[in-house]
Image (cartoon, rainbow, N blue to C red):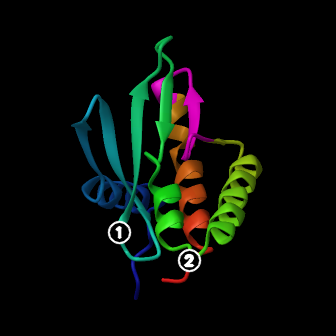
Amino acid sequence: MTPALDPSIVKYMFVEVLAQSTRCVAEDGAVRLETPFMLPDGHPVRVYLRLGPEHELIVSDGGYTSRTVTIFSRFEEEARARYEKLRQIARDLGIEYVNGELRFVATSLEQAIRRIPTLANAVVAGLGMLTW
């Protein structure tokens, strides 16, 4: 007979596994967070948190998605079309595509943390248009 599952225990154990797979370090004036979200190649999605000029939090992919699109585009026209697709993905998800970065601005750390999954989703969607 299978013992009853306690939802609070399942949630606790799941959160513990997520915490163990998450890395966070200071890097070049920002905080790099290796999230538990995965790229198509199996690496974690990295996001960068930095303070803006008015102490707002700017959370971005550090330009990773755009650089990867550039590397995997054979022609300039193909790259331009993919950058436009990144802009569309950003608009659809309520974030920005600015200066080659997928990003959003948050007024608090709590707000930033809650929106990181959306940014990770944008990174994965942006890279999903590439052939691995």
In this picture, is 62 found above or below 15?
A: above
Q: Give the structural element (helix, strand or loop) at label 1.
A: loop
Q: Amino acid at mark 2?
A: Arg
Mark 2: few, some, or many residues within 10 Å (few <14, many ≥20)?
few
Q: Amino acid at mark 1?
A: His
Q: Is residue 18 magenta?
A: no
Q: Dividing the picture into quarters, in which one does residue 15 lie?
A: bottom left
Which residue is at the front of the view, 14 or 129? 129
Question: Closer to the camera, 126 or 78?
Answer: 78
Residue at image point 71% right, 61% down: 85
Numbered circles on residues, count: 2
The range drawn in magenta is 98-110
- Magenta-drawn stretch contains 108: yes
Q: Is residue 42 left or right of residue 84?
A: left
Q: Which residue is mark 1?
A: 43
Spatial separation of the CA atoms under disc 1 and disc 2:
23 Å
Q: Is residue 70 above or below residue 108?
A: below
Of all residues, the one furthest to the front in this rendering is 76
Q: Residue at x 75, y 55 (%)?
A: 88
Q: Relative to the observer, which residue lies in front, 16 or 81?
A: 81
Residue 74 image label: 2
Return the mark for residue 10. none
Residue 68: percent from left, percent from top? 47, 64
